Amino acid sequence: MDKGYIQIYTGNGKGKTTAALGLSLRAVCAGKKVFFGQFVKGMKYSEVKAEKILSGFEIRQFGRECFIYRDPEEEDKKIAKEGLAICKEILKKGEYDVVVLDEINIALYFKLFEVSDVIEALENRKPNVEVILTGRYAPKELIDMADLVTEMKEVKHYYNKGVKARKGIES
């Protein structure tokens, strides 16, 4: 690719990470290299096994257990900042065709680092790198910078009826 674009998948509906994984699968199947960095997440979701199956796909997690129902601790901030530093270098080197920053908007929402740090990483990336940013609450600064923004809107969700995350579907 001569030019990589910035895509954002945000909103309160289900499917942001799933869409990024789908794009990653498509890219790998087209012979591209994908780096998938997951912020906030430390649980062993099913997708962490993908790099053992898919040549050209690497995934790293920059989180511990989920803190959505508690305040983030200093260790959460430290891990997220270290993850962002790794992603900045990956974006700058341009060895991957697609870089996914999964749940980076949530990391920003919980103030694990600053939006200016993410903007700097995006501005200093190799121009041919496609970047996908996921997570609810995408900040206006990133929306303004992005080339494509998709908002997932929840219309109905079985979670509201007490259905827990199912392996291979939500986790």
Image: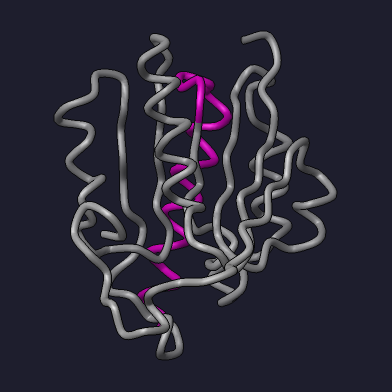
Name which residue lies at 23% across and 56% down.
45
Q: How many marks?
A: 0
Image quarter of the C terminus:
bottom left
In the rendered image, residue 89 lying in the magenta stretch gets the answer yes
Query: Residue reaching furthest bottom?
Result: 70
Q: Quadrant of the N terminus?
A: top right
Q: Position of residue 169 (x, y in %)?
A: 28, 55
Q: Quadrant of residue 170?
A: bottom left
Residue at point 65% right, 47% down? 8
Quarter-wise, where is residue 111 in the image? bottom right
Q: Is residue 156 left or right of residue 8?
A: left
**Residue 89 appears left or right of 49:** right
What secondary structure prevails in the magenta region?
Answer: helix
Is residue 11 toward the left or the right of residue 135 in the image? right
Q: Tell me residue 97's x, y (percent).
A: 50, 20
Query: What span is in magenta?
Result: 73-98
Relative vertical location of residue 144 with respect to residue 34 in this rendering, above or below = below
Residue 75, horizontal then vertical, whole percent: 35, 76
Residue 44 image position (x, y, % from top left): 19, 58
Q: Nearest the camera: 169 or 149? A: 169
Asked if the magenta segment contains residue 49, the reply would be no
Q: Is residue 3 above or below residue 108?
A: above
Farthest right residue in view: 144
Q: Nearer the viewer, residue 101 or 151?
A: 151
- Relative to the observer, which residue lies in front, 113 or 140? 140
Q: Residue 123 versus residue 171: which sits nearer the camera?
A: 171
- Measuring 22% from the left and 35% from the top, which residue is drawn there? 50
Decide: is 69 above or below 7.
below
Q: Residue at x 41, y 90 (%)?
A: 70
